[in-house]
Image: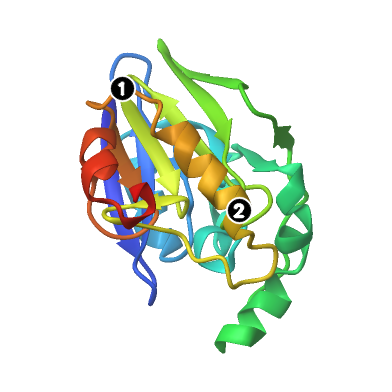
Amino acid sequence: MLIEKFAVGPLETNCYIVSDEKSKEALIIDPGDEPDLLIDYIKGNNLILKYIVCTHCHFDHIAVISDIKKATGASIVIHKDDLNLYNNIQKQGVMWGFELDPLPVPDKFVSNGDIFTIGEIEFKAIHTPGHSPGGICLLGEGVLFSGDTLFYGSVGRTDLPGGDIEKLKKSFKELMKLPEETIVMPGHGPETTIGKEKVDNFFSF
């Protein structure tokens, strides 16, 4: 499994392009900005992009989905509980001072436990509401792509529309059940591990 991380846009959102070295099949997680950079990497490495996976549908994680879809034909994947956020990306943009275009209709609604495959690599979707109603994490080969549910030493905010602190607490507890050596690659900031977050994350206390 090859993982390429891009911190894109003014909010430095972590976008990940994950690929299977043998088959060249790939998925992209949270393309929030700088589409040319992302598309150049995909095409420059001859990747076959199968999925555009949204860990949640805040604008800084989904803003350039249209560009990626147009360039690759990949399937757009979101959780249905974030569809309202997805469909209102323009209103989200206005709140933050950005002018954004509407997005294509999603191709697939993901549910808890769904499996995605690229080449010989399997990823499991874990529904982790709290930061947003339809937040998900993606787990594969000992790596958790946690979106804005879990950060290094912190968790996602819950004061945005759809946020719920009690649901986030439950999601956090579920993630802490994963093996301690699980590498966590969040939606913002540096990577960490489940073991480290069990000890140091303020949500653990």
Percent position of residue 106, x then y: 73, 45
Q: Which of 14 and 149 is in front in this view?
A: 149
**Callout 1, which amino acid?**
Pro
Numbered disc total: 2
Nearer to us: label 1 or label 2: 2
Front position in the image: 138 or 63: 138
Residue shown at the point (20%, 41%) measured from the top left: 196
Q: Can residue 130 be seen in this view?
A: no
The residue that appears at 64% across and 59% down in the rendered structure is 164
| Relative to 47, 162 lies left or right | right
How many angstroms separate mark 1 from mark 2 (CA)? 23 Å
Give the SS element for disc 2.
helix
193 vs 63: above or below: above
Q: Which of the two labelled residues, at mark 1 and mark 2, occupies the earlier sequence position? A: 2
Label 1 crowd bin: few (<14), some (14–19), many (20+), radius 10 Å: few
Q: Give the side of residue 120 with respect to residue 133, left or right.
A: left
Provide residue 199's location: percent of width, then percent of height. 22, 43
Residue tagged by mark 1? 179
Q: In this view, does 172 lie above or below 48?
A: below
Q: Is mark 1 on a helix, strand or loop?
A: loop
x 31%, y 43%: residue: 185
Q: Which residue is depicted at the point 59% across and 37% down?
A: 74
Give the numbered dot on residue 166. 2
